[in-house]
Image (cartoon, grey):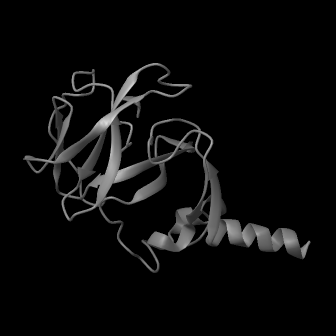
């Protein structure tokens, strides 16, 4: 009984295991990868507790997420599904994709071509994937995959990130 209680406390407040179900974060995280998420990384809120029962307002031991962090989160519209994406846009910034290229505050985000890789099952089997290293403002770098720069999501409107919110993107840009 003590072991079960201890396991619940650790999973709720310290670390939680996750399995990567899709290729939206390729090449950083692959389908079937397992990882442990640090629960106190950004502090605690009432949503950190089972069923949101804690009488907290705001966050305790708050630490702001940093651009480039890979974060597991839930959408308010669908709290049963966990998403894992990279933080690219901060509160008050503008984010846009033009011709497959990421712009933050109107500035083109640099990326360096690494090569072309054959897509891997299950999502992109046989599809050539262009491999880049992208450098976000502040210097965080990470690998991304693109099928092309002319897909249906490769030209978006300018989006202003509301205060208290963040803009997240998968590293597999055409499959995220």
Q: Nearer the viewer, residue 60 or 128?
A: 128
Q: Is residue 40 left or right of residue 176?
A: right
Q: Is residue 36 above or below residue 86?
A: below
Q: Residue at x 25, y 49 (%)?
A: 134
Q: Residue furthest front?
A: 115
Residue 86 screen position, x and y as percent: 37, 51
4 with respect to 39 (left or right): right
Q: Residue at x 14, y 38 (%)?
A: 158
Q: Farthest bottom residue? A: 61
For residue 161, say whether it is visible: yes
Q: Quadrant of residue 138 in the image?
A: bottom left
Residue 75 appears anywhere in the view: no
x and y, in percent, of residue 49 in the image: 62, 66
Instruction: Give above or below for 121 relative to 140.
Output: above
Image-quadrant location for residue 174: top left
Q: Quadrant of the N terminus?
A: bottom right
Residue 26: x percent and y percent?
45, 40
Q: Where in the figure is residue 114, as x and y percent of width and height?
A: 29, 41
Observer-nearest of 81 and 70: 70
């Amino acid at each position: 009984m003590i072991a079960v209680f201890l396991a619940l406390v650790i999973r709720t407040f310290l670390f939680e295991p996750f399995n990567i179900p899709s290729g939206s974060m390729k090449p950083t995280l692959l389908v079937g990868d397992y990882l442990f998420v640090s629960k106190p990384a950004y502090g605690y809120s009432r949503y950190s507790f089972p069923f949101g029962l804690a009488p907290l307002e705001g966050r305790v031991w708050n630490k702001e997420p940093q651009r480039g962090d890979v974060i597991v989160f839930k959408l308010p519209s669908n709290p049963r599904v966990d998403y894992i994406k990279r933080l690219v846009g901060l509160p008050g910034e503008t984010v846009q994709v033009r011709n497959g290229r990421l712009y933050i505050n109107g500035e083109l985000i640099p990326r360096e071509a690494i090569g072309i890789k054959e897509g891997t099952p299950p999502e992109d089997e046989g599809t050539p994937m262009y491999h880049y290293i992208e450098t976000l403002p502040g210097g965080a770098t990470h690998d991304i995959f693109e099928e092309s720069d002319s897909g249906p999501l490769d030209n978006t409107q300018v989006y202003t990130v509301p205060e208290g919110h963040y803009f997240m993107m998968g590293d597999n840009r055409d499959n995220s």
